[in-house]
Structures are given as C-alpha cells and as structure tokens.
Amino acid sequence: MIRQSLKFRKAITGVCVLSLVLFVFLILNKNHTNEDIVNNLNIQKQADQRFVVPSYEENYVKIVKMQSDLNNQAENDSTKKELLETRSHIEQLEKKIALLEGRIPQKYPDVTYLGHKERKRILVTGGAGFVGSHLVDILMTQGHEVIVVDNFFTGRKRNVEHWFGHRNFEMIHHDIVNPLYVEADEIYHLASPASPPHYMQNPVKTIKTNTLGTINMLGLARRVGAKILIASTSEVYGDPMVHPQPESYWGHVNPIGPRACYDEGKRVAETLAYSYAKQENVSVRVARIFNTYGPRMHVSDGRVVSNFIMQALQNLTITVYGNGKQTRSFCYVSDLVDGLLSLMQSSYTLPVNIGNPVEHTIEVPGCRSTVSTSAAVEDDPSGAGQNIAVAKAHLHWSPKVTLKDGLQRTIDYFKEELSRKTFYNNQTYMDVNIKPHK
Ligand SMILES: NC(=O)c1ccc[n+]([C@@H]2O[C@H](COP(=O)([O-])OP(=O)(O)OC[C@H]3O[C@@H](n4cnc5c(N)ncnc54)[C@H](O)[C@@H]3O)[C@@H](O)[C@H]2O)c1
C-alpha cells in the first residue's frame, strides 16, 4: 500500500514537472512567435513599399493632379503678369482721359436759343484766328449756327476749341484759295494773315488769299444769296499823306514794296467786293480795320503791342524801329467785333473805318527792359490816325475799352502763354462779357 502510494506520488510529481516545463516552453515559444510576426509584418511592409506597383487609375489621377498643380502655378504667374499689364494700361488710359477732359469743355458758354426764323447760318473765314475767334464767340452766344473755315496758317484750333462738339458749331479745315460749297446766310470774310512778318513770309500766297480767296467767297455769296462782310485794312491807305484818314481818302501805297502783297491784295479785295455788288447784286459790307490787340493774338505777331509786351515780360531788350516817334491807335478786340457786327446788320454798304481814334506812343507798365533802336521798317506808316465819323454816324459805334484795361487783359494773356507748361489747359480767353458758363 505504502509502495503504491509512493509510486502514485512520484507519478503526480513527474506530471507536474512536465507540465511546468511545457508551460515554460510554451511561454518562451509564444514570445518568440510574436516578435517574428511583427518582424515579418515590417519586412512585408517594406517589401510592399518597395515593390508594390500602383494601378493605372492611381497613376492617372496622380499625373492629372500634378499637371493641374503646375497649370495652376503657371496660371497664377500669367494672371499676375496680365494684372500688372492691365493696371499699367488702365493708368495710361486714365492719363489720356484726363488730357481729353482738359480739352473738351464740360459745359459750353451760355448760348441763347433762337428759333429757326431768327437763327442764321454764318460762315466765318479765318475764324480760328485772333479776331475771327472772338467774333465766333459772340455769334455762338447769340444762338446762330457758325461754320469756321481756316487753313491754320496763323490761326489755332485752340482759339475755338471751347465750341468743339456744340451742335451749332462746325469747323472746316480748308484753304479759301480753293472754292468752297456750303450754305450760309451771312459770310464774315476774315481769312488772311494780318501781321507784317506773317504776310511777308509768303507774299504770293498772301495776294492769292486776298484775291482768289475773296473771289471764291464773293462767288459763294452770290450762289447762296448771302450777305458778305470783307475784312479790309487801314493799310489800303498805305503811308498816308492825310491825317486822320477819312474813307474818301484813296491812299498812298507803294505797289511794289514789301507790304504790297497785303496792301494791294486788300485794295483788290475791296474792288472785287464792289464789282460783285454792282454786277451780281451781292450785298457787301467793307470794314477798314485799324490796329487791333487783345488776348489770342499770335505770340509772334511781330507788331508793336505783342513785341513790347513779350520783350518786357521776359526782361529782354525792347526794340524800337526808327526814331520811336511813330504813333499808333489801338482798338481792343471786343470793340472791333462790335463794330463788325454793327456793320453787317446795318444798311450801309460803303467802306467804314473801324478802330480806336486815340493815338499813343507806347509804355509798358512795370517794364525794366532796356531799349534799343533799329532801322525804320520800309513803308511803315508814321502814324495811324483815323477818322471814325462814318462808323459813329451810320453804325452808332465807337470803341469803349480804354487802352489801360485792354492792355492789362492782353498782358495777362501773354503771361499765361509764357508760363504754359503743358499743351492743354482749360484756359479760355473769352471776352469779359461772355465768360464761360460754370
Ligand atoms: N488784327 C489787326 O490788327 C487787323 C488790322 C487790319 C485788318 N485786319 C484783318 O482782319 C482779318 C483777321 O485778322 P487777324 O488779326 O485775326 O489775323 P490772324 O492771322 O490772327 O487770322 C487770320 C486767319 O485766317 C486764316 N487764313 C489765312 N490764310 C488763309 C487761307 N488761305 N485759307 C483759310 N484760312 C486762312 C489764318 O489761319 C488765321 O486763322 C484779316 O483779314 C486782316 O487782314 C486785322
């Protein structure tokens, strides 16, 4: 019994030892297996990473994405460039618009409305010149339709640009030596250079303008039944032997002197006017204009007012031709324009002197320039006295603006011209009575 129980105990112990050994073995074996599995998985992963070939769809999506990224970047760059270009283009356009706005008046000067019975179509030859442009201002503000014809020899678009675009205004670039076909009720024929340096520059052209040009305008007046006013000059009296000159004085002109192209040209123009009146029944008016001055005079006009003012303003030496004892009468431009309008409306058909009868020697206020003398100009009249009795009696006209006032306005204009820095500005030299409408 005891032996059997000892055997049984040994057997139990043996089983327990075996179980323990098996347990330890299993535990050890289990750890080993987990590590292996983890290692195997890592190796597999690495292998996957190295050797797994992506599918066609995956590749396609990747490539499309890369392309779109690249395109987006390129698009961003080119959009930036385009934006910069557009911005600089807009800046340039804005500058241009500002310039154009400076030239085009926002508002025109006040213009009276005339019904079709009172409104006339008026042609002004030489309307872009000094006198012509002031006349255009008055006719426009009165409410008439105005056609300006000019070849811009001495005139400038700037003188009438404040009317550009107005429905009553039209500008034709044309040389009146060639025929012109327009409809008109009245013609103010002013086209001709007026200052000696200008008309002597091309004497043949000057005489053509005053003869052929005048024939063309008288022919036009005849065709359309228009009344025509010829702008003649005191120069038809030449270097006069009579002072002051009445309209009945026939003059003292050198027909072959340097001024003859103008003086004789105007004399022929007058002869033509009265020939057309007599033969063709054309209604003519003839204004013998004396020295006129004012804003919009050509800066290189070359006559005494502009010369003295320009030289004085620039502190240059003032040139006096001859002995300096010549006298001149000076008519302010608005007075002259009033005279021309009165003559056109009057029934008086013979020549009329229009000018300021008061004679002056010249002095420029505040002038610090020195004075130099130069030889007298050939055939220059020693005095320009005039008789305006006819204008007073038949037109009820006489000049109103004093030399002091007129000179001040003219000096202001020349100052502005000298200080001008840009090509365009809004300065418009309207006559005092017709300030631009603001
Ligand atoms: N300003 C004066 O002191 C004065 C004195 C006497 C007479 N006038 C006469 O008054 C008129 C106007 O003189 P202004 O002082 O205004 O002169 P201006 O030179 O300023 O004006 C004359 C205008 O006529 C234009 N013109 C010249 N030839 C032309 C042609 N062949 N075809 C078309 N246009 C032409 C010029 O471009 C200019 O616009 C002129 O006939 C002139 O003889 C003027």
Image (cartoon, rainbow, N blue to C red):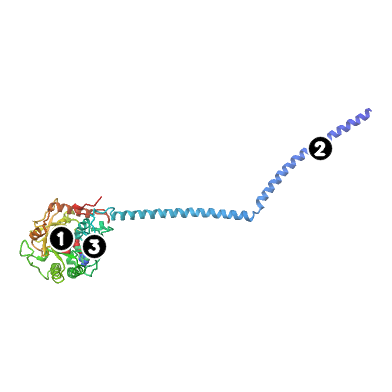
- Element type at marker 2? helix
| Number of numbered labels in the structure image | 3
In the image as oriented, which residue stretches furthest toward the right?
Answer: 1
Q: Are marks 1 and 3 in contact (CB under 8 Å)?
A: no
Instruction: Mark 1: give few (<14), some (14-19) or many (20+) Cα within 10 Å.
Output: few
Give the residue at x 57% y 55%. Answer: 64
In the image as oriented, which residue stretches furthest toward the top?
Answer: 2
Please name which of the two marks, 1 or 3, marks the residue nearer to the observer: 1
Residue 414: % across, % down: 19, 55
Instruction: Mark 2: give few (<14), some (14-19) or many (20+) Cα within 10 Å.
Output: few
Real-space CA distance between mark 1 and mark 3, rounded to the nearest whole angstrom: 19 Å
Type of amino acid under label 2: Leu
Please name which of the two marks, 3 or 2, marks the residue nearer to the observer: 3
Q: Are marks 2 and 1 in contact (CB under 8 Å)?
A: no
Instruction: Mark 3: give few (<14), some (14-19) or many (20+) Cα within 10 Å.
Output: many
Type of amino acid under label 1: Gln
Real-space CA distance between mark 2 and mark 1, rounded to the nearest whole angstrom: 144 Å
- Element type at marker 3? strand
The residue indicated by pointer 2 is: 22
- Position of 28 with respect to 100 (left or right) is right
Residue 212: % across, % down: 19, 70
What's the mark number on residue 147? 3
Dot 1 or dot 3, earlier in sequence: 3
> Is any atom of residue 326 visible in this view?
no
What's the mark number on residue 345? 1
Image-quadrant location for residue 1: top right
Which quarter is ligand 1 in? bottom left
